Every structure is written in C-alpha cells, then in structure tokens.
Image (tube, rainbow, N blue to C red):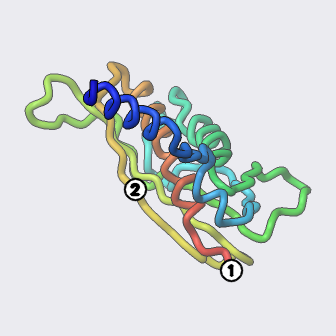
Amino acid sequence: MAFITVASVLLCACNSSPKQQTNPSNPVEQNNKAISLTLDTVDFASDTAGAKVKVECLMLERLTTAILKSSQRYPLVVKERIAGVAQTEFVLKATYTNVNAHRWVFPSLRPSSSATVKAEILKNDQVVATISKEIGSGAAFGACDRLEKIALAGGRYISKWAAKQNYN
C-alpha cells in the first residue's frame, strides 16, 4: 500500500511541473536584423571548366537557386541583380574557381567530381569578406548530376557563411 502511495505521489509531482517551452525559430534570426544582399551573376573563372561542362551542366543555375532558397533560413534578403535596378549596399559574388568533372579517388570504383566555389561580399566594390570551399561528390553516376549536386551544397554553404558575417 505504501508503495502505491509513493508511486502515485511521484507521478503526480512529475506531471505537475511546468513544461519547458521550445522555440522552433532559428537562433540566428532572433539576434540579428535581416541583411539585404544583391546576388551578382554567378560565373566560372576563366579556363575553369571545359566547354562541355559549361554548356551541358546547370551548375550556375543550381548555385543561384540554392543561394536564393537557402538564404530564407537565415536573416538574409538575397535578390538577384537586375540590370538597371539599383543594388543594395552589399553585393554577394560567387565564382567557380576550379571544376573537375571526373576524378578518381582510391579505392572508389567509379569517378567522382569536385568543384571549388569562391564567395565574396562587396561593399562599394571593395571586398569585405571572402571564402573558398572545395566540395566533392561521388554519389551520382553522371558528371553533370554530381556537379549539380555540388552546386546545391555550395549554395547552402554560401548562404550560411553570409549569414554569419559582420555587416557593421
């Protein structure tokens, strides 16, 4: 009888404690106000990728889309540059500096791909912050599929990096 009384008291006491409230919002959003960035045209550096990669693969489009979509998770307002429209104070520029469509990595039985993307934040045409990241993939069978997957990962990385910068 005493056991049942103690057990019921413990259960009631545990259930009566106030529940902790969870805040599902991103902690980055709570601390910072939204920063407006203009996304400059994404491009390849000279002699970076072969003509076939530039024509057949959608790396540039995928990187642009990934930056625009993933920036919505952070306190960023990223808009594409439109000719004739005034740009924001800060400009985000992304460039592929190295693209390797087929590389063999030991002990892999199939080729993989890698690409290095460089991102810069400019203010009045002066570089405020820069980063370079090499991303590789071997998860898709075709070279373009791998490179487009790399572009999506690069866009997410650039958005997260841009959200962490100091814009003061």
Classify mark 1: helix, strand or loop.
Answer: loop
Q: Give 9 or 101, whichever is nearer the viewer.
A: 9
* Residue identifier under label 1: 168
Residue at position x 10%, y 36% from top?
106
Q: Where is 150 relative to 167, above or below?
A: above
Q: Earlier in the sequence, mark 1 or mark 2?
A: 2
CA distance separating discs 1 and 2 = 25 Å
Residue at position x 60%, y 77% from top?
128
* Residue identifier under label 2: 133
Q: Quadrant of the N terminus?
A: top left
80 sits to left or right of 14: right
Q: Quadrant of residue 86?
A: bottom right
Residue at position x 40%, y 56% from top?
133
Q: Give 155 or 102, whichever is nearer the viewer.
A: 155
Q: Quadrant of residue 90?
A: bottom right
What's the amino acid at mark 2?
Lys
- Measuring from the top left, give residue 59's x and y in whole percent: 53, 36
Residue at position x 78%, y 53% from top?
81
